[in-house]
Amino acid sequence: QVQLVESGGGWVQAGGSLRLSCSAPSDIFIGVMGWYRQAPGKERELVARVLRDGTTDYADSVKGRFTIARDHAKNTLDLQMNSLKPGDTAMYLCHAGVPTGSKRGFYWGQGTQVTVSS
């Protein structure tokens, strides 16, 4: 198993900012790392992700407001969220894919709640 440890999140008024962080064991080779979110009654959706080669993907709803950053050496992942909207309210989960080795697979963190009030 690969444990993903998340921090950040919380409550903020619309227009505010929050920063989420995720860390994985530094001795694991990780391919993709990303953030997903799930609001009550809705399906889990990709927020943003970073591939091993540095390519980034963002959901259209967060482009221009969120920035994802990854430290490959430390296996950490940050998500800077600006201009937050009530629609961003959700549980945010860190995700990582290990492509090879005995720990090959996809892993999820426990999640951190983000609540944006209007």
Image (spheres, grey):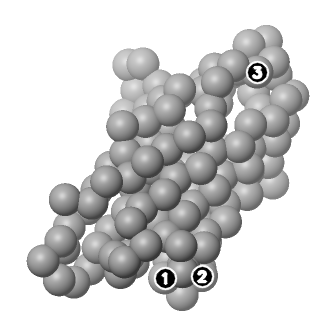
Q: Extreme bottom residue here?
A: 53
Give the residue number, with chain letter if any, for mark 1: 52
The local crowd at label 2, few if under 14, some if 14 to 19, many if 20 or more residues have their Cα within 10 Å, is: few
Residue 49, compared with residue 108, is above or below; it is below
The residue lying toward the viewer, choosing from 25 and 110, is: 25
Rendered location of residue 113, percent (x, y)? 53, 26
Point out which mark residue 12 bears: 3
Label located before the other in sequence (3 or 2) = 3
Quarter holding residue 101: bottom left
Q: Tell which circle, 1 or 3, labels the residue nearer the N-terminal end.
A: 3
- Residue 30 in the image: state x and y as whole percent: 38, 76
Is residue 45 in view from this perspective?
no
**Label 3: how many residues lie within 10 Å, few (<14), some (14-19) or many (20+)?**
some
- How many labels sit on residues? 3
Q: Is residue 5 visible?
A: yes
- Distance from the alpha carbon under mark 3 to that under mark 2: 30 Å
Under mark 2, the amino acid is Gly
Of 44 and 3, nearer the camera is 3
* Quadrant assignment for the N terminus: bottom left
Q: Which residue is mark 2?
A: 54
Relative image position of residue 92 (x, y in whole percent): 50, 37
Relative to 92, does residue 33 appear above or below in the rendering?
Answer: below
Q: Are marks 2 and 1 in contact (CB under 8 Å)?
A: yes
Residue at screen point 43% across, 73% down: 26
Quarter residue 89 falls in = top right
Element on which disc 3 rests: strand
Q: Cα distance, mark 2 to mark 1?
A: 5 Å
Residue 116, x across and y down, in percent? 70, 20
Callout 1: few (<14), some (14-19), or many (20+) C-alpha neighbours within 10 Å?
A: some
Seen at 34% across and 76% down, the residue is 28
